Amino acid sequence: MKKVSIVIPAHNEERRIGRTLHHYYRYFEELAQEHERDFELVVVLNGCTDNTLGVVQEFAQNKNKIHILNLQEAGKGLAIIAGFKDALTRKNDLIGFVDADMATSPNEYDELIRNIGNYAGIIASRYMKGSTVVPARPWWKRVGSKIFYESLIFLLFGMKYHDFQCGAKLFTHEVIKKITPQLSLGQWATDVEILYLCKRHGFKIKELPTVWHDQEGSKLNIKGGLRMFSSLIKLRLQYLSLNFLIE
């Protein structure tokens, strides 16, 4: 029976994290009881100034499959890295992460587990044929992302995926053990860095259509978009080397 460690970064999520933990824990606990797979949830609070910790601690009482990390500094990247490092201290076959707002349901996350096959990793995509986003996003948002964001990533890193930022990704233990010491971005563009490191190490990553439920309260705004752009440039300069033209 394979074991999966699911990292859940949480920044000021007191209103949503309880619901997410309830549904994820119940779903995967039922699979564990049926000997489908074992699991653990690694909740990583980062820079929370609300009662997220209290909500998580209350839910985690008498549940040995939940691990809680409480970082003082905010940053999704920091939370993911810390969660990866914590998961690597225990035995597991797969390690991944998912957003705390439950835009990805536990059943949809389980689709990643069921479909990873012999790939080194698998990422959910909101924009592949067969994907569903509820409610539907304005067409201009998708066009803008495709023209500017995805084109920039291809230009800088030579990578092409339908969706770099979807907050549901899964990798083998081997991949996370290899790339985690090299992860450096504490906030923006962490997803891109993870995929780029996978590329540099020759790991094959699969992309899978998903059902995504857009949630209110997104933390990415225009200011965040500019920081994302800055992080991408910083990341390219960081990995700039003589083999740039053959990557």
Image (cartoon, grey):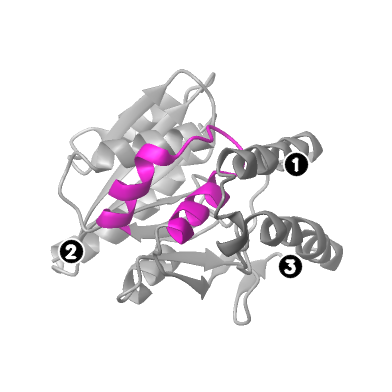
Which residue is under mark 3? 136
Q: Main secondary structure of the magenta part?
A: helix
Look at the image and give the residue range highlighted in magenta.
172-200
| Residue 236 horizontal/vertical position (percent) | 63, 45
| Residue 243 horizontal/vertical position (percent) | 55, 55
Toward the right, the furthest residue is 140
Q: Nearer the viewer, mark 3 or mark 2?
A: 2
Query: Which of marks 2 and 3 precedes in the sequence?
Result: 2
Instruction: Kindly indicate the quadrant of the structure image that contains residue 80.
Output: top left
Toward the front, the furthest residue is 242
Which residue is under mark 1? 225
Which residue is under mark 2? 2
Q: Amino acid at mark 2?
A: Lys
Which of the image's four quarters has the N terminus? bottom left
Q: Are marks 1 and 2 in contact (CB under 8 Å)?
A: no
Residue name at image x 64 percent, y 51 percent: 215
Q: Is residue 244 magenta?
A: no
Q: Is residue 196 magenta?
A: yes
